[in-house]
Image (tube, grey):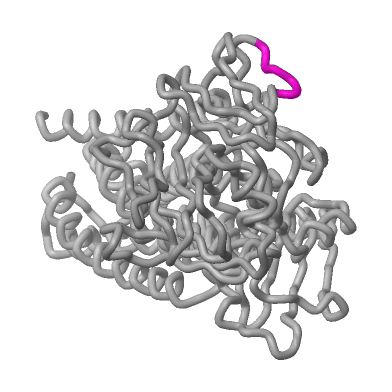
Amino acid sequence: MKSLRRHVIVLVLSVLVIVATFVYTIVGSGDRPVLGLDLQGGISIVLFPEDGQDLSSLDTAVDIIRNRVDGLGIAEPEISRVGDTVVVDLPGVKDREKAEELVGQTAELRFRVVQDIRPWETVAETTTTAPTDASTTTAPAADTTTTAPGADTPTTVEGEAVGVPVETEPIAAVRPAAQDATTAPTTAAADGASTTTTTAPATPPEPGQSCEDLITPREERLADSTVWLPDADRTSCYLLGPTILTGRNIGDADGEYDPGVGAYVVNVTFKNDDFVEKVATPYVGQLVAIELDGVVQSAPQINPGITGRDVQITGDFSKGEARDLALVLRYGSLPVQFDEEEKTVQSVSPTLGKDQLRAGIVAGIVGIALVMLYMVLYYRLLGLVVWAGIGLTALIFFSLTSWLSASRGLTLTLSGVTGLIVSVGVTVDSYVVYFERLKDEVRQGKTVRSSLDSGFKRAFRTIIAADLVSLLGAAVLYLLAEGSVRGFAFFLGLSTVIDLFIAYFVMYPLVVLLSRNPALLRMRGFGVASGLDVAGVRA
């Protein structure tokens, strides 16, 4: 009785958890599987590099395009490199001209003067700024500038201070590049902190207003306008003045370890003297933001003494941070130029996607129905166990797919639907293995009750071995394949894991409960004994 009670508890808890999770997904969270381009429709764009381009930077171009498209709010875009081309799939986008305009265009790196910095959560109710003339030299006030932990002395070169006093030193140290002074990146201002500004904010924020509400819409981010923009980590928002310089003036940038500084730095070389004339000279002591695609990548402070084209950005950089900032500076525009004439744009009709999904679902339902009908005809009452298992598996699939779509960006494509349908065979195999093992046990003269546990132990080892082979195949396919094949492999692997769960926590206890009921065991023509096809079976 104790063993039977344990099976009841395991079965009831498993079913309750599965059903409750499904109900919460439907009613509570409202999450739904996100459909891919082939099911939802949208735009597919293929970009071809121009002849003679350095394709070693193509992966960098893919990353830049991906970051740009992600910022547009398009649901689950897929940007990938296929050979020497870049394929951009934009599900749900119906405006062909807008898609062509956004993908593959050259982004512009801009330098803008920082007028104000606010913490992301909530804008302070009062603003402390120090308006100054743009042509004068100003420095952050000592009581409002974030200081660097452990900074004990300003950096000097040839007897000239290129930093600021200790009590006002920004969070990054300052060091010249060659014989020139440099810029030093700062981090987000702390709550309540304020920075030196060149002009008062054009549109002061309302008390309690968040940065999310302040961010300037994409279409209003003009070169000559004042804008509110976020930093890359969304910890602060910046009020920036009009563009004073663009990334076209940058010749090269690289991140490396500088023994003289004892840290990773970013060395920048400009093509001309525009940086000195337009930034370094008029904005000494002020913060100048480096903006790319509406995101503040860094906000260094301009220090005195910059007279040449080589400058160095120093700060508390890790190796990866220095490299990433160098890439932004070097590749503010796409590192690979794409041929506009060869670019192909294909509109995928939502109607076609719906037709494909409907056809796939119909095919899946027909296939599953035939399998379940066969299981009932062959295994009788035990066939209903297969029905219950497949039904609960469907609920788990829906809940997991919805959650992964919302939290991890999983997209359900037609190949994924195919993987789900194929996985039914993996699931049914587990039931067949157990039922056939029970037949063998009973035919050897054992009672049904004594065969349940021993038969499951032997059958479960076989189920694990079979599922591991399937899981290994799916994993290899997922790692080595590209595009839609990966979706097929993912859902096939997911079904394998769920199959192990259902076999242990649902199939096994449910078969035990049915077999230990004498009425269900000996039910004429449909009972468990009929399904095991053994005459005179003993309970």
Rendered image quadrant of residue 338: bottom right
**Magenta segment, principal secondary structure?**
loop
Whether 251 is drawn above or below 306: the answer is below
Left or right, 199 with respect to 474, comes to right
Instruction: Provide residue 200's location: percent of width, then percent of height.
Output: 69, 22
Instruction: Name the residue rendered at 73%, 54% in the picture.
Output: 91
Q: Residue furthest front?
A: 159
Give the x, y percent position of residue 352.
Answer: 82, 60
Which of the 4 quarters of the picture holds residue 459?
bottom left
Q: Which of the two residues, 386 or 298, is positioned nearer the viewer here?
A: 298
Number of numbered discs on residues: 0
| Front position in the image: 411 or 394 | 411
Q: Nearer the viewer, residue 215 or 530?
A: 215
Can residue 382 be seen?
no
Q: Residue at x 21, y 52 (%)?
A: 537
Residue that sits furthest to the bottom in the current view: 52
In the rendered image, residue 291 lying in the magenta stretch gets the answer no
Residue at 64% in and 34% down: 136
Give coordinates of residue 300: x percent, y percent. 51, 45
> Along the horizontal axis of the image, is 220 left or right of 196?
right
What is the quadrant of the C terminus in the image? top left
Q: Residue at x 56, y 42 (%)?
A: 284
Does residue 411 appear anywhere in the picture? yes
Task: Out of 208 and 501, give the one closest to the viewer.
Answer: 208
Task: Describe residue 32's horizontal placement relative to residue 145 as left or right.
Answer: right
For residue 357, which quarter of the picture? bottom right
Q: Please report the bounds of the magenta region as a residue range.
A: 201-206
Instruction: Quarter of the image for the N terminus: give it.
Output: top left
